Image (cartoon, rainbow, N blue to C red):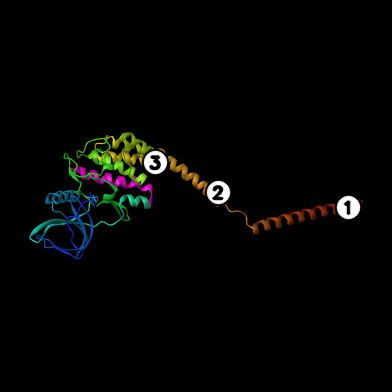
């Protein structure tokens, strides 16, 4: 979790060249991307293009995050976390600073993306997130500090990606980093033990955050407040049963939650409602586009009517004239 309220332990200027002790790769610092309790992240450039470099005085923290990125890499098809590109030490003034280099992911964070594209994307992106969490959990890790600020939507095609794995924790241990709104311990709905259900609670709270486009604080009864806030938002009604099960810890795996989320979003009742709305919309559209008669058509119609009237008059007069001749002959 990147926290700007902390003092940055590093303050290297733009243009600083970092050369790895072991792999001998060189990186030019372009700008600082952020810093937190576990290190500082810089945008760098090398012969292959742009990348993100994270350095820290805590070698154990670097090792832990590298292991998480390696866990992502071992999962075929998973692209939640950035790709790991390099791990090395930088020797400066006789001291070694451990660092690793990862893929630089560009795009808006999840909250900004929903603000731009609309609430209809919530279910789609949460489904993607749950699929990748399933893979991460199978590798024995819990993400921990799940929140929209740590999630980037890259693309198109749009794909949810993570930019900070600093809170990832081995299952069974205590969560290393968390943000209160997405933490079940803060709401009094569970402990901070690293297990899949901890991440799934955070996923449900992400949905709530995206629906309101803001966070809110706990007052008295955390569970009751969450239920109340979910009920108020129409965007969450289809997902509400799934989200409530998640905040109450009733899912044992991300796979199970994702399956029920997809079922909820594609339920027959929802499809029937959509079909009905589409039929009504099409009917309204047809009625709306029904052409009105033009002035030329109205004039032509009146002209035809006059011609018919004239014809009938002529026929009638002709008949009367024939009758007159008949009686004259008699």
Q: Identify residue for label 3.
A: 233
Camera-nearest residue between 318 and 78: 78
The numbered mark, 3 or 1, whose residue comes first in the sequence reads 3
Quarter where residue 267 is shown: top left
- Circles 2, 1 touching at the beta carbon (< 8 Å): no
**Boundaries of the magenta span:** 117-142
Say left or right for 281 vs 56: right
Tell me: residue 60, above or below residue 186.
below
* 204 or 192: nearer the viewer: 192
Quickly name the residue at label 1: 324
Which label's residue is closer to the chain start, 3 or 2?
3
Distance Cα–Cα, label 3 vs label 1: 87 Å
Residue 144 location (% of width, % of height): 22, 44
Of callouts 2 and 1, which one flags the residue occurring earlier in the amino acid sequence? 2
Q: Which residue is denoted by mark 2 in the rendering?
A: 287
Residue at disc 1, secondary structure: helix
């Amino acid at each position: 979790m990147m926290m700007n309220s902390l003092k940055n332990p590093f303050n290297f200027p733009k243009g600083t060249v970092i050369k790895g002790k072991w792999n001998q790769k060189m990186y030019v610092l372009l700008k600082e991307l952020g810093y937190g309790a576990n290190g500082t992240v810089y945008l760098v450039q090398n012969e292959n293009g742009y990348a993100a470099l994270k350095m820290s005085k805590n070698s154990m923290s670097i090792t832990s995050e590298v292991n998480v990125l390696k866990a992502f890499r071992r999962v075929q098809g998973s692209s939640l976390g950035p790709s790991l590109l390099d791990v090395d030490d930088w020797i400066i003034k006789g001291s070694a600073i451990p660092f690793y280099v990862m893929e630089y992911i560009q795009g808006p964070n999840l909250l900004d993306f929903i603000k731009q594209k609309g609430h209809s994307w919530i279910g789609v992106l949460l489904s993607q997130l749950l699929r990748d969490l399933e893979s991460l959990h199978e590798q024995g890790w819990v993400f921990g500090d799940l929140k929209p600020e740590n999630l980037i939507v890259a693309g198109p095609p749009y794909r949810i990606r993570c930019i900070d794995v600093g809170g990832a924790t081995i299952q069974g241990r205590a969560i290393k980093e968390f943000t209160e709104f997405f933490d079940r311990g803060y709401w009094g709905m569970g402990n901070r033990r690293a297990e899949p259900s901890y991440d799934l609670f955070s996923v449900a709270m992400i949905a709530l955050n995206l629906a309101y486009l803001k966070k809110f604080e706990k007052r008295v009864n955390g569970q009751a407040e969450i239920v109340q806030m979910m009920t108020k938002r129409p965007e969450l009604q289809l997902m509400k049963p799934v989200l409530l099960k998640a905040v109450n810890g009733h899912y044992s795996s991300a796979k199970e939650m994702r399956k029920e989320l997809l079922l909820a979003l594609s339920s027959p009742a929802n499809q029937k409602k959509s079909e009905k709305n589409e039929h009504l919309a099409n009917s309204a559209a047809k009625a709306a586009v029904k052409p009105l008669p033009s002035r030329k058509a109205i004039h032509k119609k009146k002209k035809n009517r006059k011609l018919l009237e004239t014809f009938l008059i002529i026929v009638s007069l002709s008949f009367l004239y024939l009758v007159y001749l008949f009686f004259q002959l008699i």
